[in-house]
Image (cartoon, rainbow, N blue to C red):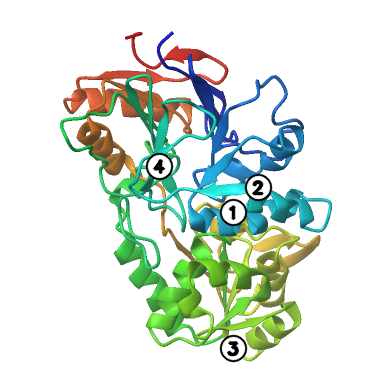
Amino acid sequence: MGVEFISHRGAKAGEANLHELRWSGGHLLLDCGADGASKSVIDGLERPDAVWVSHAHGDHCAGLLQLAARWPRVPLLATETTKRLLGYALAGGDDTGGRRAEAVAKRVRTVEMKQFRPLPGVNGAELMALPAGHVPGAAMALVRCEGTVVLYTGDFCTHDQAVVDGAGIPQLGGGESIDVLVTEAVLATDEQADRLRWDEEASKLVEAVEKADGPVLIGVGAIGESTEVASLLVGAGVAVMVDEMLREVFEVCAPRLVDEVSFAGRRRMKQRLDAGGVVIAAGDQFRRTSSAGRLAGRIIDDASATIVVLNRARETTGAGRLVGGARGDQLEWAGRPVVLEAEVVHRRLINHAPRWQLDAVIRGVGAKKTLLVHGTDGARWALKRAVQKAGYNGEVVVGESGVLYAAIAAC
């Protein structure tokens, strides 16, 4: 039968990632994500032989609670850092106070970077983890099965960040080549992202905080942005208070920072803002129920205050309203009208690969076939045209969720 690939979900943007490699000797699930729309993540799935978890973001791992409940003996594979973060990442969907999330995390078998290891329960198949950049613990999966080598990138970037080093372009030695590349395409048509340079954006962020005359509130995603921003500010000598909810993430991802910032609950964070200090709070979208969303209500009408929004600023969220507003505008915040007087700073510390990196990896890997997933239809079709125009000679497939594709012709 050769090797086959299917995106049960995640071919398109906005879907949780749930992909699968199939061959005559086994089934390997590539990520098991879930989102608010995913009532039953694993309905219709056959029991996989193993599950690879690329990193600890919900759209790549949140379905593990359901999967582990149905198939408690299926091996779960991830890097050591991702394993340590999974209890935190899964806790939001756990109705047992985190006990099930921790139990699932403990089941994970760790995979060392840059070393092939046998896939448990699958004769003759091997998997190697390769650094993916993106966030702490994120890794690409290089799979050998039935004479075919498949690289699944998950989310990745090749530029260095403050805490996480960028991914290189994967290459195999000994004359071996990668047959199939399965890659994300989230930022493939984001022209602004293609022009940005991470270190320049980071410098502008630090500059905005240093020149602020009053309180500074920075809303962050827990796994990724929180430690990156704290590392930048601590390195610049800025005194930082961090949301107590993020302590576990810091202990895993950036232990050197634990003693260099102060952790506090919401009451003390409010006091720090009242005193004109700098606070990093959970909630990159400033949703009403997040720490960042609630704290923003305290300073949104303060002309001396600065509110920092990072990366995505979806129109329907608090972040989108902040970025789309101007000083003097009336906004609805936490169910009440307020006048926006604080300065809003929007900086993009992107941790996905922009177009130029996607192109470099696709052409650098030089696989016989490339499957594009995890991006809008427009982004994936545009990326296909761009890499073909740039000289990539392999086949490019813009995958659809639920469609089974032959990874390469049967050997």
Residue 6 visible from this viewpoint: no
Q: Quadrant of the C terminus?
A: top left
| Residue 373 relative to residue 326: left or right | left
Residue type highlighted by circle 4: Met
Residue 50 vs residue 20, the one in the foreground: 50
Q: Is residue 6 above or below residue 125?
A: above
**Label 4 or label 1, whichever comes before in sequence order:** 4
Packing grade of label 2 (10 A; few <14, some 14-19, many >=20) is few
**Tag 4, which secondary structure?**
strand
Give the residue type at disc 2. Thr
Q: Are marks 1 and 2 in contact (CB under 8 Å)?
A: yes
Q: CA distance from mark 1 to mark 2?
A: 6 Å
Tally of numbered discs:
4
**Mark 1 — residue?**
320
Residue receiving disc 3: 276
Q: Which residue is mark 2?
A: 316
Q: CA distance from mark 3 to mark 4?
A: 42 Å
In three-dimensional space, the C-alpha distance between marks 1 and 3, rounded to whole angstroms, equals 24 Å
Q: Residue at x 31, y 38 (%)?
A: 358
Q: Position of residue 260 (x, y in %)?
A: 50, 85
Q: Residue at 76% across / 51% down in the picture? A: 100
Task: Compare marks 2 and 3 and give the one earlier in the sequence.
Answer: 3
Mark 2 and mark 4: Cα distance apart in space? 32 Å
Q: Which residue is mark 4?
A: 140
- Identify residue type, mark 1: Gly
Q: Is residue 328 left or right of residue 213?
A: right
Would you say the residues marked 4 and 1 are in contact, meaning their CB atoms lie under 8 Å apart?
Answer: no
| Badge 3 vs badge 4, beta-carbon distance below 8 Å | no
Mark with earlier residue (1, 3): 3
